[in-house]
Image (cartoon, helix red, strand yellow):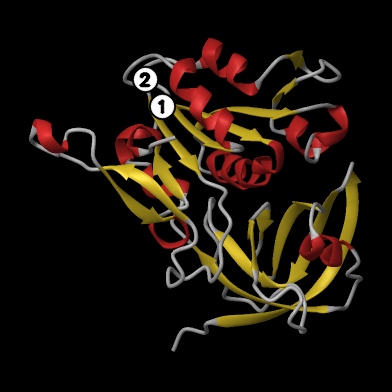
Amino acid sequence: MKRLTHDSQVVFNRKIGRGIFHMRLAVKAGIRVKPGQFINLLVSDSYDPLLRRPFSVFDASEKSIDIVYSAIGRATFLMSRKIKGESLNFTGPRGNSYIDFITPGMKKTLFIVVGGGTGAASANYLAKWLRRAGMRLKLIQGAASKGLLIKAGEFCKKGVLFSTDDGSAGIKGFATDIVKKAASVDSVVFACGPKPMLGALKKAVPKGTRVFVSLEEYMGCGIGACVSCVTPVKVKNAGTKRVKNSFEYKRVCVDGTVFELDELVL
């Protein structure tokens, strides 16, 4: 029977930027994580905070899972104080994966992988998978400033292109500015980041370019029961003028987190 929860131990919990931390968890062998999936961490044994918190996987091996997070609220502040050897319980990995959308016919496709803010964590693990699979890759990371870039040294090893709002690293501008120059109708874009960035991707790529995005949403349960992470999705093949612009809600935690951008109502 598949276990619903897992215990882990903190290997390290390092500050790597302004309010940004990199945590490695030692886990039991056999937990397989695919790019784009997340784990749901129980930050405290008390009732404050009550709910688990979802985190994209930055990297994973047979015996470890890495996450990168910003300390911006009580839960992540408590996480930032965790030290080596402390125990953390989590559920997962959960959600679908970027690689669920990769077909055998895409072997020669240029994959443009974009990470904005802490969405770069999700992009990193996907880029690692694509490189190992021998796929063509262009990796892009965007942030407000140099101090908010995620693991810049590791990304440089993957041939990353940086953008910062203030020009303190890479080009001055947005990640979508780089996408605009790199994308073609034959490329495939995978992205994770804030919704304004995801919305801007629609205008940054030529018409017909396939774009898949991993959504970052607040989650209550992480298993689809509480319906707190729903997002509007266009109804496929609506068929009549009366329902032409209709949409339905899907749960990011179980129906995603990865969706085709054209399906989303942003």
Residue 113 showing in the rendered view: no
Identify the secondary structure beneath mark 2: loop
Q: How far separated are the C-alphas under marks 2 and 1?
A: 7 Å
Label 2: which residue?
186
Image position, residue 142 (x, y; %): 70, 28
Q: Is residue 180 left or right of residue 19?
A: left
Q: Is residue 79 left or right of residue 50?
A: right
- Which residue is at 53% across, 40% downward? 130
Q: Amino acid at mark 1?
A: Thr
When the figure is inspected, residue 175 is found, relative to residue 237, above or below; the finding is above
Image position, residue 221 (x, y; %): 53, 71
When the figure is inspected, residue 211 is found, relative to residue 36, above or below; the finding is above
Image position, residue 210 (x, y; %): 37, 28
- Which residue is at 52% across, 23% downward? 200
- Which residue is at 61% across, 68% downward? 40
Q: Please name which of the two marks, 2 or 1, marks the residue nearer to the observer.
A: 2
Residue sticking out furthest to the front = 242
Q: Is residue 228 left or right of residue 233?
A: right
Identify the image quadrant of the C terminus: top left
Category of crowding for the residue at label 1, using alpha-carbon neighbours closer than 10 angstroms: few (below 14), some (14–19), many (at least 20)? some
Dividing the picture into quadrants, the one containing residue 113 is top right
Identify the image quadrant of the N terminus: bottom left
Label 1: which residue?
109
Image position, residue 251 (x, y; %): 41, 58
Q: Are marks 2 and 1 in contact (CB under 8 Å)?
A: yes
